[in-house]
Image: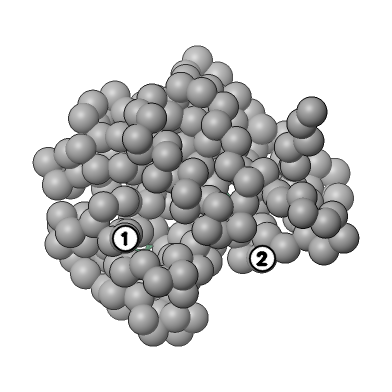
């Protein structure tokens, strides 16, 4: 599969690296190919392609979005027509002051992106934990139980593709429903940050899905 990354910082770089190693053709949609994040992603994995944002998006089947929420409008607006009909994996979180929801919990960041790009197939994924768990999602000692990755989106076909990518990466995908469920996922992120980083539990924990 051809996958492009807009943003290869803490979140984008480990996911891009792992997906390339799984055999996907992974391109960095680089606004500046000499930037520190692009260079360190390449140091980690020299097999990542570096392209202009337009070239990377035009040839991609799936686009991962992993940039600060505040940069979304300026980054995505010039790519609007290239992104048309593509699957966009929204890894962003709108985080506000003092760890509040950045859109005052009125609607999710993912729905804001969907509104900006109405014909893009937005799927929220890879958001509810700190990036350390995207670097390494192995939790020894739990048998076959895999860490859960909660996703949300309106397009069933797009969610099937993202579900498959989650499984390839060693996550148990949990489809929470339509994109409006992203608001709850964004609140889960705040919960995770408060437990892990504010209360000091540390970044090495995730949720699992136990079902009967
Ligand atoms: N950090 C976490 O633990 C975590 C976990 C889950 C989700 N998230 C969410 O994931 C997103 C990325 O977080 P991060 O920690 O990976 O950030 P980061 O390490 O600061 O990396 C940000 C990336 O976005 C790019 N970027 C910044 N402004 C841009 C713009 N205007 N246009 C295009 N690209 C731009 C940067 O590229 P340059 O090199 O060109 O500046 C860089 O590659 C955020 O929305 C965050 O809330 C973070």
**Image quadrant where one finds the C terminus:** top right
Give the residue pinned by disc 2. 136
Which percent across, then down, holds residue 39?
39, 79
Point out residue 163 in the picture as x, y percentages from the top left corner: 49, 44
Asked whether, in this view, residue 15 is left or right of residue 56, the answer is right
Q: Looking at the rendering, which quadrant does residue 154 occupy? A: top left
Q: Are marks 1 and 2 in contact (CB under 8 Å)?
A: no
Total numbered labels: 2
Residue at horizontal 55%, vertical 59%?
169
Q: Quadrant of ligand 1?
A: bottom left
Question: Quick check: 19 left or right of 184?
Answer: left
Residue 210 percent coordinates (x, y): 78, 35
Considering the numbered disc 2 on the image, is that residue within a helix, a strand or a loop?
loop
Separation (CA) of disc 1 from disc 2: 22 Å
Can you say whether 105 is above or below 119 in the image?
A: above
Q: Is residue 100 above or below residue 200?
A: above
């Amino acid at each position: 599969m051809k996958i492009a990354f807009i943003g290869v910082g803490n979140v984008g770089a480990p996911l891009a690296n792992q997906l390339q190693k799984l055999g996907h053709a992974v391109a960095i949609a680089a606004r500046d190919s000499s930037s520190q994040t692009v260079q360190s992603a390449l140091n980690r994995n020299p097999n990542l392609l570096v392209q202009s944002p337009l070239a990377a998006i035009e040839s991609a089947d799936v686009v991962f979005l992993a940039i600060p929420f505040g940069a979304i409008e300026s980054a995505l607006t010039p790519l609007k027509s290239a992104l048309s009909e593509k699957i966009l994996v929204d890894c962003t979180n709108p985080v506000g002051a003092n760890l509040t929801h950045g859109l005052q919990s009125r609607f999710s960041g993912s729905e804001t992106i969907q509104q900006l790009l109405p014909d893009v197939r937005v799927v929220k994924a890879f958001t509810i934990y700190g990036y350390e768990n995207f670097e390494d999602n192995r939790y020894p000692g739990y048998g076959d139980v895999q860490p859960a990755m909660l996703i949300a989106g309106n397009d069933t076909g797009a969610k099937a593709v993202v579900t498959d990518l989650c499984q390839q990466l060693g996550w148990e995908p949990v489809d929470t429903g339509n994109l409006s469920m992203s608001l709850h996922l964004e609140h889960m992120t705040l919960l995770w940050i408060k437990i892990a980083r504010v209360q000091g539990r540390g970044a090495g924990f995730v949720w699992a899905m136990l079902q009967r």
